[in-house]
Image: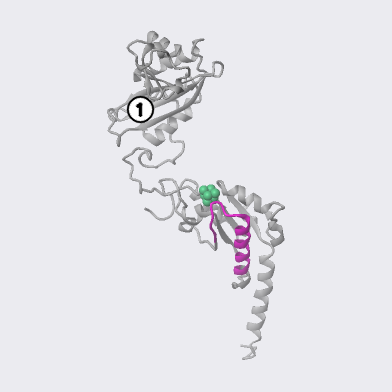
Amino acid sequence: MSSTPPSSPLDKLGAVSQSELLPEVLTLLESQFSGKVLSVCVNLGDWEASVAKGSVPEIMRFLRDDKRTDFKMLADLSAVDGLKMGLVPRFYVVYHLYSIKLKHRLRVKTNVSEEDPAVPSLVDVWPIANWFEREVWDMFGIRFTGHPDLKRILMYEGFQGHPLRKDYPVNYRQPLIGPRN
Amino acid sequence: MAFGNSGLPSFLTTKLDAAIGWARKYSIFQYPFVTACCGMEYMATACSHYDVDRFGAGLPRFSPRQADVLFVVGTVSHKIAPVLRRIYDQMCDPKWVVAFGVCTCTGGFYDNYATVMGIDTILPVDVYIPGCPPRPETVLDGLIKLQEKIQHQRQEIA
Ligand code: SF4
């Protein structure tokens, strides 16, 4: 590890977590929410923070409203099923934030277990989270507590299971009409 | 039989069939059921460079009740499949179906939970136009094949 910080985070491959190399947003986040922010790092040039599930709305609200972070835009919200990667807990939900004014991005992750697949909803923080959360529910079966209308968005009513879970059988079809499997 | 063995009735119906077939094949009103990327190629075929109007298929109708050829253009998912079937059922006879692009022919590369593996699992298909997407020449070739089929089939008059 060199003592001088790299000129661009992209110069550095692999995760960096020494505090002197971290951008202000991450150090700010860590000092503001110690105990709730589990880890921060710069991974392949991207800022990344891992947070506790229960404090997601609180942290997100701060990230949106604080002048130094100013993440006014939730660019994406998705999930990862780590079944085949042996992740424990099995899922994590990923939030991609973007600041239109300051032009920086942040990825926030939170772990979700298979037994209790529920995360607090962010619809109150960013209204766009409504559809994103419905998609994650549809594809991964992760519930979002406090969501006003958590129903499937891509698959149809009556579809059994959640197709992007790694244990969904790859050949399994559920046609509404036409030949069964 | 009033005509006895003269062969006149079959002569007449054959000529009538040919005449009706000729009329039908040059007045194709299509219903474009466009769901995905193939739609761009459908538009390219319909525009002046390739000009399907030369084949009498220039007027798409956006009501199934006014159409006689259902062009299924693009990926068909299980969610949209009942809609497609319903549109087919709403069309009046005589009617034909063209599967446009490999997605509609076989499902293409989408071998997954969402996609219908070929629309012939839910509808009878007359002409398959392969390609991802098919070039306009291929589409015109398919259209000519459909016209041949219309010309040579028995013409039902309801
Ligand atoms: S055949 Fe290819 S171009 Fe046509 S709808 Fe399917 S993927 Fe798109």
* Chain bearing mark 1: A
Q: Is residue B68 left or right of residue A73?
A: right
Point 60% across, 66% down: residue: B145
The amino acid on which the numbered mark 1 sits, given as a three-letter code, is Tyr
First to last magenta residue range: B128-149
Q: Which residue is nearer to you in this view: B8 or B27? A: B27
Residue at x 64% of width, y 90% of height: B6
- Ligand 1 contact, mark 1 (Cβ < 8 Å): no
Percent position (x, y) of residue B21?
65, 70
Question: Residue under circle 1?
Answer: A92
Q: How crowded is the residue under tag 1: few (<14 C-alpha within 10 Å), some, or many (20+)? A: many
Q: Nearer the viewer, residue B131 or A172?
A: B131
Q: Is A124 displayed left or right of B135 in the figure?
A: left
The image shows residue B43 at horizontal and vertical percentages of 65, 49
Q: How is the image coloured?
A: one colour
Q: For residue A149, say whether it is visible.
A: no
Task: Tell whether position A88 is magenta.
Answer: no
Q: Is residue B20 above or below residue A110?
A: below
Does A81 appear above or below B151?
A: above
